[in-house]
Amino acid sequence: MGKRHISLKDLANELGVSISTVSRALKNHPDISQSLTKRIQQLAKERNYSPNPLAMGLLKQQTRMIGIIVPDIVTHFYSSIISGIESIAKQHGYYIVIASSNESYEKEVETVENLLKARVEGLIVCLSQETKDYSHFNKLVENSIPLVFFDRVCHSLNVPTVTADGVVAAKNITKHFHKNGCKRIAYISGPMYLNISKNRKEGYLQGLKECGLEFNPELLVECNLSPEDASRATEQLLKLPVLPDAIFGLNDTIAFAAMKEIKRQNYKIPDDIALVGFTDEFHSTVVEPTLTSITHPTWQMGQEAAKLFFKCIDGNIKTSDQIVLETELIIRRSSVKKR
C-alpha cells in the first residue's frame, strides 16, 4: 500500500468485513465480538492506521478547518497575526489553511472560492490592496458562514472586524515630528478606499491641527503600496519647491522605499528629512539610520480575530463586534533631529 494514508476501507478489505464493522470495533462497540475487535485493532496498529480528521469532519459536515487569506505571507506583520490565529484555533481543535491573495483582487476572489470548495468552516481575511468590490464575500454572509476581517476591512458587510487604531497612531506620529522641530510634514498614503489609508489620513489631519499647522495638499501623496510606486511618490515630494522636513508612510515598505530615494538624492535622515514607518518590521532595527515606526499588537490581533471567529461558530456574535487595538510609537534615530 506504499506510504499513502491507510483508510477504514483498506482495513475492511483486508479482513473481509464492512467499513462500519471496522469503525465500530476501533471504538470498542459492544455489538462487535471481542475476538474480531482484537483482530481489527491489531491490524490497525500494524498498518499505522490513524483517523483522517478531514474525512471525519466531512461525515459530520465539520472539517474543523479555518481559511485564512492575507495579502502576503512574507512579512512578519502577517506571519505574526497568523500565529496568533493558530494559537486560538489549536485550543478549539481546529486547523488553519493559509492562502495569499498577492495583493490581487482576482486572486482573492479565486481563493475564497477554492477555500469554500475545500470545505473550510469559515474565513478570516485581510483584504488585498485592489479590493473595492466585496460581492465575493456575499455567499458567506448570506449562508451564515463565519467571516471575520482584520486590519484591512470592509465595514459595509456588517461582519466582525479587528483593526489597530490608525487615527491615534498617525496623530502621534505627526505630533512626534512637530516636537522634533518639523513643520512641513508629508504623508505617503495607500489608496484612499482602504480603511487603513483613510484612518491614518484622519489622524494626520488631527495631528496637524493640534500642532497648529495648516494642511498642505501637496504634502499628501498616494501610492499603490509597491516599493516602486512608493519611490515615485517620494520623488514627487522631493521635487517640491520647498522640501518636506518629515515624511511618514502607510507601512514600513513605503518608508524603506522613501529612505532609499532620500539617500539616493543625497539628503540626510533625519537632519534634512525625518522619517517614520508603520508596522515595525524587523528591518526597522537594521537599516541605517534605524527606523522609527508604529508597532502593532499583531499576535493579539490574530488572537482576537480567531476569538471572534469562534463566537460566530457558537452563534454568539454581533455584527457590531468591532475590536480596535492600541498601537505604540517606537522611537529610533530616523525621526530625531539634532538640536
Image (cartoon, grey):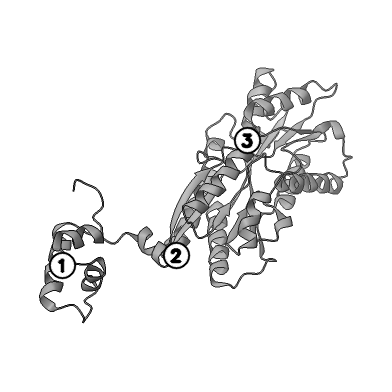
Note whether residue 81 is visible.
no
Work out which quarter of the rendered image holds the C terminus and state it: top right
Q: Is residue 89 left or right of residue 249?
A: left
Determine whether the residue tagged by mark 1 lies in a helix, strand or loop: helix
| Residue at screen point 56% across, 61% down | 304
Amino acid identity at mark 3: Arg
Amino acid identity at mark 1: Ile
Determine whether the residue tagged by mark 3 lies in a helix, strand or loop: helix
Q: Is residue 187 left or right of residue 36?
A: right
Front position in the image: 255 or 50: 50
- The answer to whether mark 1 and mark 2 are in CB contact below 8 A is no
Residue 220 on image: x %, y %: 80, 35
Front position in the image: 31 or 166: 31
Residue reaching furthest to the top = 265
Mark 3 or mark 2: whose residue is earlier in sequence: 2
- Give the class, few, some or many, for how many residues have Cα within 10 Å of label 1's Cα (few <14, many ≥20): many
Mark 3 vs mark 1: give the one in front: 1
Residue 40: give its label: 1
- The answer to whether mark 3 and mark 2 are in CB contact below 8 A is no
Determine whether the residue tagged by mark 2 lies in a helix, strand or loop: loop
Q: Is residue 191 left or right of residue 111?
A: right
Residue 332: give its label: none
Judging by the rendered image, the residue that carries numbered circle 2 is 62
* Numbered label tally: 3
- The answer to whether mark 3 and mark 1 are in CB contact below 8 A is no
In this picture, is 51 found above or below 32? above
In this picture, is 226 found above or below 79? above
Mark 3 or mark 1: whose residue is earlier in sequence: 1
Q: CA distance from mark 1 to mark 2?
A: 27 Å
Residue 333: give its label: 3
- Give the class, few, some or many, for how many residues have Cα within 10 Å of label 3's Cα (few <14, many ≥20): some
